[in-house]
Image (cartoon, rainbow, N blue to C red):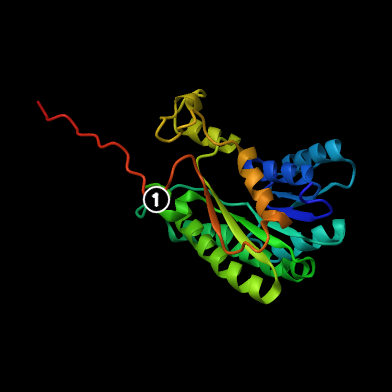
Amino acid sequence: MRLDGKVVIVTGSATGIGAAIAARAAEEGARVLVHGLEADLARGVAEGIAARHGPGWAAVIVEELAAPGAAERIVEAAVAAFGRIDGLVNNAALVAGGDLAATSRALFERMMAVNVLAPLELVRAALPWLERSRGNVVNIGSVNAHCGEPDLLPYSLSKAALQAATRNLGDTLFARHGVRVNQVNPGWVLTANEIDRKRSQGLDDDWPARVERRFAPAGRLIAPEEIAAVVVTFLSDECGPVSGQVCDLEQYPLLGRNPPKTILPRDA
């Protein structure tokens, strides 16, 4: 087990990719602090881990990440439950659409508060414990950090900022404190929230089976568990001295892709 005896905080782990990361970390031997906004969902994840691995394997905290003192309370909860911290996974994020015209200042500030400032505050609060254990941080970003979909401007900007923070902290914190910082940028992942989002856009429930092959060469979207497998590798000691790196997890190259050109028919 690659995380045997370690303690990992996973924010936003009541659902989706975060829940998959929490479950996989436990499978690899880690005790896990499950965090979320919905107490019943967070408890469900923790109870699932406990049922598989035993009592005391998971603890729960419900916190609004942008609230004052939230980072300190999350760190304190992990230490109170398990006595140490070896890994921090900054997975929780606000996802909201908007282009330049539709993005208000309030939405942009909220996006940055949850997706950038909260992870930075968590790293700062956990740093003394991570330095003690020579632990590490894994930030969960998005391939939208490179440019972003047309209607995901505020979200894309926040993930680009997080990516820059990962590279900066991955250099400075490793050199000064022995704490590695890396990032995973998921592409299109089939989570329950993504299913709900597409349903709200008017798509039928069978839309995942009809995704174009240019977006899903495998014939399906990426599963949350496949993202979790890579995150666990970054959390583990076998990752060695790797720090300040950003790993894109998509089915095709994001840079250098040259799809076939389509010529529209001439108007009759």
Task: Kindly identify which residue carries mark 1.
Answer: 255
- Amino acid beneath label 1: Leu
* Residue 141 picture location, percent across and down: 55, 53
Residue 227 location, quadrant: top right
**Between 263 and 95, the one nearer to me in the picture:** 263
In the rendered image of this protein, does residue 204 appear above or below residue 229?
above
- Quick check: can you spot residue 197? yes
* Residue 81 picture location, percent across and down: 86, 56
Element under disc 1: loop
Q: Residue at x 54, y 37 (%)?
A: 194
Apparent side of residue 55 relative to residue 140 in the rendered image (left or right)? right
**Between 77 and 31, the one nearer to me in the picture:** 31
Single out the residue that lies furthest toward the right: 55
In the rendered image of this protein, does residue 206 appear above or below residue 140?
above
In the rendered image of this protein, does residue 210 appear above or below residue 140?
above
- Quick check: can you spot residue 63? no
* Residue 263 picture location, percent across and down: 20, 34
Apparent side of residue 156 relative to residue 237 in the rendered image (left or right)? left
Q: Residue at x 56, y 60 (%)?
A: 245
Residue 193 location, quadrant: top right
**Between 28 and 154, the one nearer to me in the picture:** 28
